[in-house]
Image: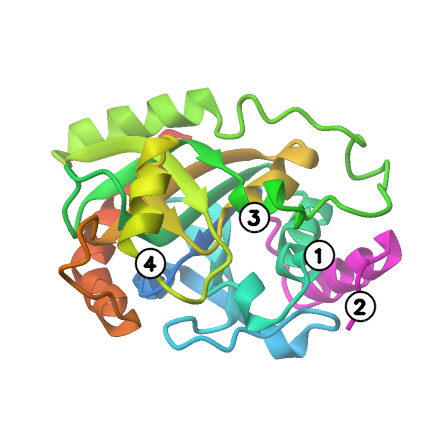
């Protein structure tokens, strides 16, 4: 298993993607568990399966299609990552975040990242959308930071600032877009854990105590690498289940995917409205 990638390897993948399309996207969208329906709206897409790309890890999780789509959406040229890679699948953090590096080498300037997340805030209900205003890099704080290892100066600084991981102008754009669409848009802090086990009630009470509003098993490492490379980020969680603070209910992946059917139309509407304003 490869621990670190070189600039030449990132450029090898980027070059192969360029050879398959004349599109030159500046915006990328990562679609989380059960949230892949937006990909069907991409016009005149070029589709590239993950397993057609050298070094690119392949998603093993049901609900993640595992392909790149490049085409037009709301008159913007976009790259859509339908499905993502997770740390719990056994990949290294560098493998998990390889797609972000390739996006940067392709000239992506703005990343819209979505996820299905569990509620930690007891006021949130399944089907809600939550605008991510900040995150807690719990896995990174425990030693699994995707920037660990040799720094490639061409990609970003050794010690990048994370005080505004989520772009404030994009946050305001999303607020305005949600208001105009009549969508309820919660706001809060997302915490990224390693998974794959769901959190127990004591875990959730602890996460609430330290300031988390939603919890998931992705996103934070992707955003960390995006900001390292000066990519602007907008993050949106789809709340898939109620906070189980008392241990009286269970959470399943099937429940997450089922919630995606409710969340997806709202997520699609919001992202399309945001794209129109970028």
Placement of 234 over or under 66, stated as above or below: above
Residue 165 in the image: state x and y as whole percent.
53, 29
Residue 91 in the image: state x and y as whole percent.
64, 68
Can you tell which of label 3 and label 2 is closer to the viewer? 3
The range drawn in magenta is 1-25
The answer to whether mark 1 and mark 2 are in CB contact below 8 A is yes
Let me know if residue 63 is in the magenta part. no
Residue 108 visible in the displayed image: no
Residue with the mark numbered 3? 139
Q: How many marks?
A: 4
Label 3 vs 4, first from the N-terminus? 4
Mark pair 3, 2: CA separation: 20 Å
- Which quarter shows the C terminus? top left
Mark pair 2, 4: CA separation: 32 Å
- Residue closer to the observer: 152 or 200: 200
User: Callout 4 environment at 10 Å: few (<14), some (14 to 19), or many (20+)?
Assistant: some
- Where disc 1 sits, the SS reads helix
Placement of 162 over or under 91, stated as above or below: above
* Apparent side of residue 159 relative to residue 258 in the rendered image (left or right): right
* Apparent side of residue 131 relative to residue 124 in the rendered image (left or right): right
- Where disc 4 sits, the SS reads helix
The answer to whether mark 3 and mark 2 are in CB contact below 8 A is no
Residue 218 in the image: state x and y as whole percent.
48, 54
Mark pair 3, 1: CA separation: 14 Å
Residue with the mark numbered 1? 94
Residue 150 visible in the displayed image: yes
Mark pair 4, 1: CA separation: 27 Å
Residue with the mark numbered 4? 38
Label 3 vs 1, first from the N-terminus? 1
Residue 150 in the image: state x and y as whole percent.
87, 46
- Residue closer to the observer: 73 or 186: 186
């Amino acid at each position: 298993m490869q621990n670190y990638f070189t600039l030449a390897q990132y450029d090898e993948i980027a070059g192969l993607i360029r050879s398959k399309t004349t599109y030159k996207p500046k915006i990328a969208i990562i679609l989380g568990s059960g949230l892949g329906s937006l990909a069907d709206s991409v016009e005149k897409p070029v589709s590239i399966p993950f397993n057609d790309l050298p070094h690119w890890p392949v998603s093993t999780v049901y609900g993640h299609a595992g392909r790149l789509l490049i085409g037009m959406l709301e008159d913007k040229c976009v790259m859509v990552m339908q499905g993502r890679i997770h740390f719990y699948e056994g990949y290294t953090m560098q493998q998990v975040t390889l797609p972000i590096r390739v996006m940067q080498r392709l000239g992506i300037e703005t990343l819209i990242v979505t996820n299905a997340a569990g509620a930690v805030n007891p006021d949130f209900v399944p089907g809600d959308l939550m605008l991510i205003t900040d995150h807690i890099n719990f896995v990174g704080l425990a030693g699994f930071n995707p920037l660990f290892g040799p720094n490639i100066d061409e990609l970003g600084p050794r010690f990048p600032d994370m005080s505004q991981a989520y772009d404030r102008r994009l946050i305001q754009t999303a607020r305005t877009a949600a208001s105009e669409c009549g969508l309820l848009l919660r706001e809060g802090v997302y915490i990224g854990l390693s998974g794959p086990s769901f959190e127990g009630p004591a875990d959730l009470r602890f996460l609430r105590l330290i300031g988390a509003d939603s919890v998931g098993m992705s996103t934070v490492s992707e955003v960390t690498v995006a900001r390292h490379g000066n990519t602007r980020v907008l993050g949106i969680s789809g709340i898939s289940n109620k906070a189980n603070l008392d241990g009286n209910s269970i959470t399943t992946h099937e429940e997450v995917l089922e919630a995606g059917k409710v969340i997806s139309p709202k997520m699609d509407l919001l992202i399309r409205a945001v794209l129109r304003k970028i």
